[in-house]
Image (tube, grey):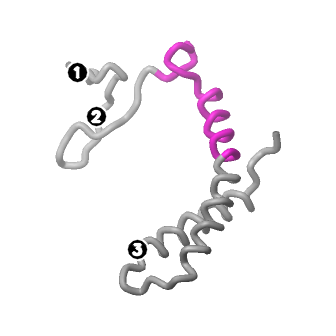
Amino acid sequence: MRDMTEKDVLRYIYLVDRRLNILTSGVHWKPEYETELEDIDRELSELRFLVDEEHGKRKRKAGNPENPQCRHFNYRSRSGAGGRKKVRKDGKSDKD
């Protein structure tokens, strides 16, 4: 299987952006958008395979919960002020 190139990434981003623009066009909908959406969806499904492969590579490289290489901590917001607190994967903070 081939690796996802920069060109593939840029094409994927462009197609997603174009698809969203069409879907949110509202009252400015044009009949030709239907055919364009079908073409976009077809091409996105082809690129999606490469995207999934890249995600799999990153997950394998980072490890998973069953793998001891996995980081024990992740960061997520635990305060309404937007501050960040170190939180273990079990949901408890360092200081709990």
Q: Amino acid at mark 2?
A: Lys
User: Label 2's element?
Assistant: strand
- Main secondary structure of the magenta stretch: helix
Query: Would you place residue 27 above or below residue 19 in this image?
Result: below
Q: Is residue 65 magenta?
A: yes
Q: Position of residue 23 (x, y in %)?
A: 45, 71
Q: Amino acid at mark 1?
A: Lys
Q: Residue 33 is drawn in which quadrant?
A: bottom right
Q: Position of residue 91 (x, y in %)?
A: 28, 23
Residue assigned mark 2: 85
Q: Residue 11 is drawn in which quadrant?
A: bottom right
Res. 24 mark: 3
Instruction: Determine whether, in the image, residue 4 is placed left or right of residue 16.
Output: right
Which region of the structure is painted magenta? 49-71
Q: Residue 88 is drawn in which quadrant?
A: top left
Residue at screen point 63% across, 34% down:
56
Q: CA distance from mark 3 to mark 2?
A: 37 Å
Label located before the other in sequence (3 or 1): 3
